Image (tube, rainbow, N blue to C red):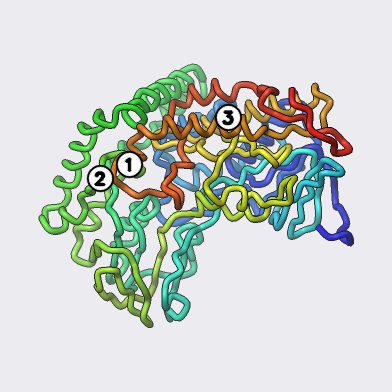
Amino acid sequence: MSGTDTVVQHVRVVVVGSGFGGLGAAVRLRQEGVTDFLVLERAGSVGGTWRDNSYPGCACDVPSHLYSFSFAPNPDWPRTFSGQPEIRAYLERIADRFQLRPHLRFDHEVQGARWDAAASRWELSTSQGVYTADVMVAACGPLSDPSVPDLPGLADFPGKVFHSARWDHDYDLTGKRVAVVGTGASAIQIVPMIQPKVERLVLLQRTPPWIMPRMDRDITSAERRLYRRVPAAQRALRAALWSIRESQVGAFVKRPGMLKAAQALAKRNIDKHIKDPALRARLTPDYSFGCKRVLLSNTYYPALAQPNVDLVASGLKEVRGSTVVAADGTEHEVDAIIFGTGFHVTDMPIGSRITGAAGRTLGEEWKDGMAALRGSTVSGFPNLLFVIGPNTGLGNSSMVLMIESQLNYLADYLRRLDASGAAALDATPEAQRRWNAEVQRRMARTVWNNGGCRSWYLDGNGNNTVLWPGTTAHFRRETRSVDLAEYDLVQTPATAPVTV
């Protein structure tokens, strides 16, 4: 922010992002009696990743009744695993039901945020002007900025190129030769949807995923009527789904050997649908079940067995004119390239836009790996709280559970801040170091670190800075309240911090 910039508005709290995390934070603020807040959203509507990912077949791999806020159950989910349109519509209803519209500011991309030590507040430069806030909540989410590899020749490709999270609905794939790059959660949903209409589908696979059958079905009108009339029935179902997911955590984080039975089922799933031995071999992972995210599909393998599909068991190396060239030398001429290559998760772009008390950006602070106290606060960045921060991701359950835990922490943070009389709280370096050392100690035993794969859970140094190595109940306990002993109190005007 330059000296000539004019502050549009000052608020108590500013929330960045309006997906599950941002809307959840807004609801919680209102529940806590905080109405002096804004939600800055770079797009033109709410929804976050469920707004951006509108590709064919986009759906959630967590049961609908668990993938929703506990304070806003939806008795009318149409399927056990809901699709993107239904989830996005649910978030729009949240904005209406909890009267969040007056707080939303669309088309407000945060271009920079810096901590003003003299005023003890955050200054945010946006595409629509400058805002200041006592507290900033970063709810951008890790699945918000698509990652497209920097490939030789890609810029000169004469056909159509887009990422799965930026689907071009105006481009007709019918009769086209299409290359799909990647075999993650998005790709396995896209491939079966476009395979019947394209002339040729080339799937470039670096490593195959383990895939289990998707136990999806329509939720009957009688069931939905029951949930509307007897809310306790829906709560009981949610509790059962939660318990099942919680019971699986031990196998992922402590006893990976327990996953061998599940791996055998996944192997049988391949054998059931893929009869060609050579293709079956290319689709069988050489790493442990659970090391990468386990995917769910009933249609992916059947689509790959069709005669108009070529599976290239190699990543994309370069593009020569209209020809995609794989690392194994395989060449295919295509009309369109669709990247299902994930997101900037361990190198979130917003990190370069947030500048802390010492004049360093969050990206600089995290150059050796993301780290935060209880997944929420970062030393040197007073009054900055994350929703879905470092090591809060899950490999087998609903992120909404983790979000609600972090909202508990946010609410208590504001209470403790007000009660302390300080202008800001700043996590101490020792508290942050101690927390993350324990997280990484527990991570060392997990299948994610020892399963023999390279996943998007790991950063450039091979550290897992994405997932939480425990149950959601454990995280809920760890974030129930703020311990002021883990924070320095920052006074106004800026003076030496006082440790409690």
Q: Secondary structure at mark 3?
A: helix
Q: Residue 404 bears which disc, if any?
A: 3
Q: Residue at x 58, y 48 (%)?
A: 366
**Nearer to me, 267 or 30:** 267
Q: What percent of the width, then of the height, locates residue 85?
A: 50, 47
Q: Residue at x 71, y 26 (%)?
A: 31
What's the CA distance linking mark 3 and mark 2? 33 Å
What's the CA distance linking mark 2 and mark 1? 7 Å
Q: What percent of the width, then of the height, locates residue 357?
A: 75, 45
**Nearer to me, 475 or 39:** 475
Q: Secondary structure at mark 1?
A: loop
**Nearer to me, 213 or 412:** 412
Chain-order first, disc 3 or disc 2: 2
Q: Nearer the viewer, mark 3 or mark 2?
A: 2
> Residue under circle 1?
291
Q: Answer whether residue 68 is visible to the viewer in this image.
A: no
> Residue under circle 2?
287
Q: Answer whether residue 313 is visible to the viewer in this image.
A: yes
